[in-house]
Amino acid sequence: MAGTDPIHQFVIEDMIPIHLGGDGTAGSGLNFSFTNSSLFMVLTVAAITTFVLLASSKRSLVPSRLQLSGELLYEFVANMLRSSAGKEGMKFFPFVFSLFTFVLFANLFGLVPYFFTVTSHIIVTVALAVLVMTVVIGYGFFRHGPKFLKLFVPAGVPGYVLPIVVPIEIISFLSRPVSLSVRLFGNILAGHITLKVFAGFVVSLGALGWLGWLGAILPLIMTVAITALEFLVAAVQAYVFAVLTSMYLNDAVHPSH
Amino acid sequence: MVTQAYAQEAVTPAEEHVTVDGTTGAVDATHADPTADTHATTEAHDGGHSDVFPPFDPATFPSQLLWLAISFAALYLLMSKLALPRVGSILEERKARIDADIAAADASRQKTDAAIAAYEAALAAAKAKAQGIAAETGDAIKTELATKRKAVEADLASKVTSAEARIAATKAAAMSHVDEIAAETAQTVVTQLVGDVSADSVRAAVAKASKE
Amino acid sequence: MEAEAAKFIGAGIATLGMAGAALGVSNIFSNFLSGALRNPSAAPSQTGNLIFGMAMTEALGIFSFLVALILLFVA
């Protein structure tokens, strides 16, 4: 039954148990075990590092295909950040590049059968979004001091509207990490569940004999189409995550908009 | 569909146990951990949370947060200290190289332009010089010709005048002889007609006749 | 009514919110297409905005999906 269960793919299993605290009884304390999720986080980092280092190992003037793809990735993120946050925002380039590649590679890894999808767990996306907002707020106050609060007071708005506009701005600012994390999490989760449900149709129809086999063609085609769509979603969500990060960083760099 | 599957999972927790236990056991064996304790923990964990949707299971949060922090920090450090400077330096190197090449090409083009300009200037100068030389030579030839012609003309003119003088002298001489011839002729004619006549009277008659 | 049944009904109603997201996303793409056909040369520079707007709109549909999930598994 676990084969066709669309939720089973999200189960986290301990691989190297590490438990801290608690009174020794089961379920107490904090579970810091090395899990399948951790394994794929490490694999993601390893894959990104290998890719970028391999791509830049030759240092040839006329790039090979691998080097060109690495350079395209670099230029893509650099242009995205430069167009959103300006030249001053380029000091966050390694941060945005790490975020983009991490999300992208984690999403793409998740599409390989039997691989765990790191970004399908809300705590991971929330942690990334909170990290982004921490960097934005931290750098904003570090760079501009109290002037950073001008972010909530749009320029050119007449004074009597401010009591309405400022709370709206604050709420929209506070909802950013929520929407940022839930968007990524929801897209990936929904995509994987849909994929698994349709793949499950194939299995359960196939068990019904030859008529079932015939009927299973439709969900099979659907599965293939959804897989292609999920590749698009994986890339688009990584892009959106990085673009929004760049825009939020722009607020930290230039708070008065 | 989600609900149905979820229900299926809830109905068959035993199968879940087997899988999880098998994996954990294998890993444990390689790492020589106290197997009994882990089994108990895993079982309890699994049994306690099997009805929780895995992405919302708070029991997995500490582990995920810790490993996310470790892996993302490692990624950030690797990217910012090692990988991105390398890629950036490659791109900058290429940009510098291309800019230098373009500058070199510009410089050579300017050189070429200068060379072409110099060549054209030299050509123009040479042309002007050639024209100058041609004009000078023409002038010299003209003046020479003119002097020569003048000399020849003067020579010719002197020859003509001397010839004219000679002709005039000859004419005058001839004219002086005419009287004598006429006198002789007249004496002969008169002698034949009249007889002897003195030469002096004939001469006087001729002179008288030629004066009329 | 049982609480369990109410959860399922609520989850089902929550998914209706995705209809709005569907309308929004289709609106974005149809407007982009009509704009792109009017001025094809400007279209490639706006694909970033297209994808961005699509993701922003789609997120709202994802929220209703999330509400359904929470009703099913958490609440």
Image (cartoon, rainbow, N blue to C red):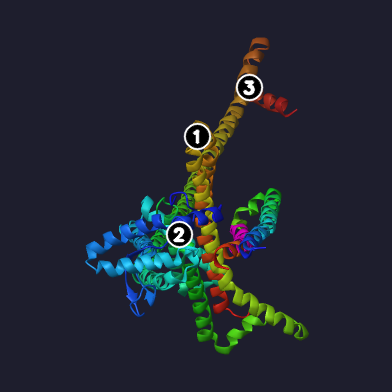
Front in this rendered view, residue B139 or A63: A63
In the rendered image, residue B138, in percent from the top left (x then y), is placed at 50, 46
Q: Are marks 1 and 3 on the same chain?
A: no
Q: Chain of mark 2?
A: A
Provide the residue span drawn in magenta.
Answer: C48-66
Front in this rendered view, residue A158 or C73: C73
Q: Chain of mark 3?
A: B
Q: Choose the circle earlier in sequence order: 2 or 1.
A: 2
Where residue A213 is drawn, which disc sits there? 1
Residue marked by disc 3: B183
Task: Report whether residue B102 is seen.
Answer: no
Query: Which quadrant would residue C72 be assigned to in this image?
Result: bottom right
Above or below, comparing residue A27 to residue A66 in the picture = below
Q: Chain of mark 1?
A: A
Q: CA distance from mark 2 to mark 1?
A: 28 Å
Q: Residue furthest front?
A: C1
Q: Residue furthest bottom?
A: A146
Which amino acid does the dot numbered 1 rest on?
Trp
Where residue A10 is drawn, which disc sits there? 2
Query: Which quadrant would residue A15 be assigned to in this image?
Result: bottom left
Front in this rendered view, residue C41 or B21: B21
Q: Residue furthest top?
A: B192
Which amino acid does the dot numbered 2 rest on?
Phe
